[in-house]
Amino acid sequence: MTVPPPSSLPSGPSGPSVPSAPGPHGPPPCPPVSPPPLSGLAVASLVLSLLVCLAPLGLVLGIVALVRIPRTGRRGKGLAIAGTAVGGAVVILTALLLVIGGARFTAWTEEGESLFGPQEPKAGTLFDLKAGDCFAPAGGLFSAQESEDERMTDPSVEIVPCDGPHPAEVYGTFRLKGDHAISDPAAIAAQAFEGCVPLLHGFAPDTWTLPAVEFSFYYPESVSATGGDRTVRCWLGAEAGLPEASLRQDPGTWDAGQLAYLKAMRPSAEAWFSVPEQVDTDLAAATAWADRMAEGGAESAKLLRAVDGLPARARGPVTALANRLDALSGIHRSASRAPTLAEFGKRWDYNGDEDESAEEWEARLVLGLPVEDEEEDGGEQQ
């Protein structure tokens, strides 16, 4: 028997294909997607920023993490932002506390107090003294200077609060110039004198108002090139004692006109304070001082005429003072060329009137600066 061949499928449009039924277990599952790794820098930034001493490092790591995360695709941007913010806040707050605390501590110590109350006197030596220290030397202020041997045999001092009894105050210190050896005490003393005068006018710009004090300094007898103390300590003192307060003057107590006047008078005042001890016996020292007086007076006269903003009532007295300083400058310059000490004295002492005190008194009075009241036995008036 012949088996007929299978019939072919009819041609024509076919209906939608029917998908085959899935197997008993369904299609194979897709593999899970793992999240990107967390940035270690971001985590370290937040942790370190919470530790005050390491906050600056946390701030730096947070900034580095914020730069790297977009490139690496890691997680932790929020942690990095938090670490940067916290670290920055801690750094700024710490800096503010240090500035404010340092200013308050300086103010306390300058007034003779510390964080725990008034400072107690303490023993030390001349080598421990620094600017602003009030002190009492064991051997007295001037006993060594008045003897033939000016060396300090006892360098012991007692450093005391300036708001209590004290005979002296250090107004400045500086190092001798250069690093070479100096064996001549006279050369060291001359350099010490030259360096201390400007420091005095930085410490007390209005020297007119200082009490009756001596201007002096401590200096090493000799210095080597390999080391040793090269510091000069400049001080003001009085055997009877200084006022129970620092002599340091606060420029904030003067107005603009008063400050300009004091600044203009500084060259003349510095020249005056530079008078050498041997002015009556050493012609070279005397003529050099006269030359400084001439230069200082001329410079102060020039600055006084250039001062702006003075009250109208002060212009006349200030101009009169400038004219007087110019006249004195010419006389001092003549004295600086004197061939002998006798001639120096003649040229310096012109009619017994050798300073500008009357004109300066008038100028200070109209500017509102303290002046001596002659009617009240040397008191002061405003």
Image: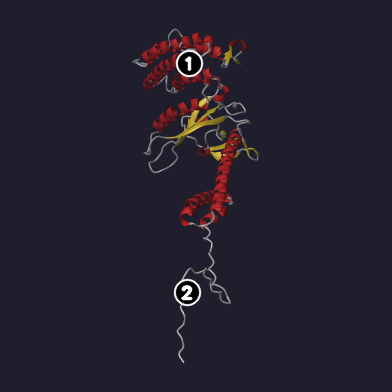
Q: Amino acid at mark 2?
A: Pro
Q: CA distance from mark 2 to mark 1?
A: 118 Å
Q: Position of residue 366 (x, y in %)?
A: 55, 12
* Whether residue 154 is visible: no
Which color scheme is applied? Answer: secondary structure
Q: Give the camera-side residue of 289 and 279.
A: 289
**Label 2, residues with CA under 10 Å away: few <14, some 14-19, many ≥20:** few
Q: Position of residue 77 (x, y in %)?
A: 53, 53
Q: Give the camera-side residue of 102 and 196.
A: 102
Query: Would you identify the image quadrant in which residue 364 lies?
Result: top right
Q: Amino acid at mark 1?
A: Asp
Which residue matches tag 2?
10
Query: Would you identify the image quadrant in which residue 324 lies?
Result: top left
Say which mark, if any, is on residue 308: 1
* Whether residue 69 is visible: yes
- Mark 1 residue element: loop
Task: Assign the C terminus to one quadrant of the image.
Answer: top right
Residue visible at 52% across and 58% down in the picture:
40
Badge 2 or badge 1: first in the primary sequence: 2
Q: Give the camera-side residue of 229 and 281.
A: 229
Residue visible at 42% across and 35% down in the picture:
176
Residue visible at 61% across and 28% down in the picture:
245
Q: Is residue 283 left or right of residue 155?
A: left
- Mark 2 residue element: loop
